[in-house]
Image (spheres, helix red, strand yellow):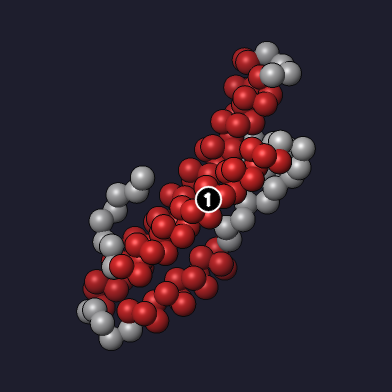
Amino acid sequence: MTFRILPITAIAAIALLTLAASAWAGTADEQTRELVQHRYGACLEHASYTYIQMWESSCDEVCAQKKPLEYCLRLHDSWNTATCSLPLSVADKLDHQLERDKDRCLREFQAGVTEMTFD
């Protein structure tokens, strides 16, 4: 079992946004740039939210293997990367999915995607 800290931070997201924003300098009007930047931030938030939801569900499953399901479900909303250790293989799978989601957000940002829909 291992403890994991949520690998996305606000500072990292801002740094990526600032770096990627340079690709937009002078290529689109200000309103479009703002919309694309807002969408990028929302995409990163969605990726983090999905990661947390998947972590909590995995914690429920691990807990249910040892304790009654009702007990585990009562703890569901308190699970996080500090209160629930997952097997390394499960944690790595979730971490890799988060990285893929963040990479997708960046690619969509660089492509100028403005639709507020996420997978």
Question: Which of the 4 image quarters holds residue 104?
Answer: bottom left
Specify whether residue 22 is in view. Answer: yes
Q: Residue at x 54, y 37 (%)?
A: 54
Q: Is residue 38 above or below residue 86?
A: below
Q: Identify the residue at horizontal 69%, vertical 19% (top origin).
A: 65
Residue 9 quadrant: bottom right
Specify the quadrant that holds the C terminus.
Answer: top left
Picture coordinates of residue 47 (x, y %)? 47, 50
- Of all residues, the one furthest to the bottom in this rendering is 26
Q: Tell me if residue 83 can be seen.
A: no
Front residue of 74/43: it is 43
Q: Residue at x 53, y 55 (%)?
A: 99
Tell me where residue 62 sits by quadrant: top right
Residue 22: x %, y % from top left: 39, 81
Residue at label 1? Answer: 98
Mark 1: secondary structure: helix
Estimate the x, y position of residue 50 in percent, counting from the top left.
48, 43
Front residue (pair 100, 63): 100
Q: Quadrant of the N terminus?
A: top right
Relative to residue 23, is residue 10 drawn left or right?
A: right
- Establish if 24 lies above or below 95: below
The structure residue drawn at horizontal position 28% and vertical position 62%, both measured from the top left corner, is: 113
Query: Count the marks: how many?
Result: 1
Q: Residues within 10 Å of mark 1 (few under 14, many from 20)?
A: many
Q: Amino acid at mark 1?
A: Leu
Left or right: residue 90 versus residue 20 is right
